[in-house]
Amino acid sequence: MEIKSSGKEESFATGAVRDKGEDKNSLELISPFFENRLGNWLTKGAQRYARRNWEKGIPNERCLASLMRHLNAYRIGKKDEDHLAALACNVMFMLHNEEMIKRDVLPEELGFYPDYGE
């Protein structure tokens, strides 16, 4: 296996050289607060259901319904749960489903594709 290269390298004062990675995902830009709250919400879900339960596939329509309930709870100022983390979690589930459906790992019926007849 080879190490992939963009063809653009950067040299450092130490003499080290590294691929610039300009076209690579900037995962380091994701807020650590976001990651912590999402991780906390996922931990609570794992305790309630099972670790990685969501990866088995929850229909996007159900995720969207949950997302909307948490959005409305947040909008009216409810503080009984971390509604923003729940929103993020549902978005993550739906994004994951879309990618796994594209890869033919999860069934297409988990997606949510209403036909409004363009």
Image (tube, rainbow, N blue to C red):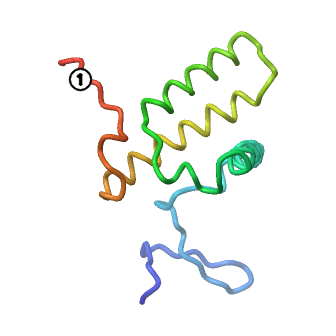
Quadrant occupied by the N terminus? bottom left
**Residue that badge 1 annotates:** 115
| Position in image of residue 96 (x %, y %) | 47, 49
43 relative to 105 in the view: left or right: right
Identify the residue at image location x=69%, y=30%.
84
Identify the residue at image location x=42%, y=47%.
97
Hey, which quadrant is residue 60 in on the image? top left
| Position in image of residue 74 (x %, y %) | 70, 18
Judge the density around disc 1: few (<14), some (14-19), many (≥20) Cα neighbours within 10 Å: few
11 or 71, nearer to the observer: 71
Identify the residue at image location x=43%, y=38%.
59
63 or 27, nearer to the observer: 63
> Above or below — where is 85 with respect to 13?
above
Identify the residue at image location x=77%, y=28%.
81
| Position in image of residue 13 (x %, y %) | 73, 79
**Residue at the far right in the pictured view:** 79
Under tag 1, what secondary structure? loop
117 relative to 1 in the view: left or right: left
**Residue at the far top in the pictured view:** 76
**Residue at the far front in the pictured view:** 49
Type of amino acid under label 1: Asp
66 relative to 76 in the view: left or right: left
| Position in image of residue 8 (x %, y %) | 47, 73
> Above or below — where is 88 with respect to 78?
below
> Above or below — where is 22 with respect to 81?
below
> Above or below — where is 65 with respect to 106?
above
Hey, which quadrant is residue 104 in on the image? bottom left
11 or 64, nearer to the observer: 64
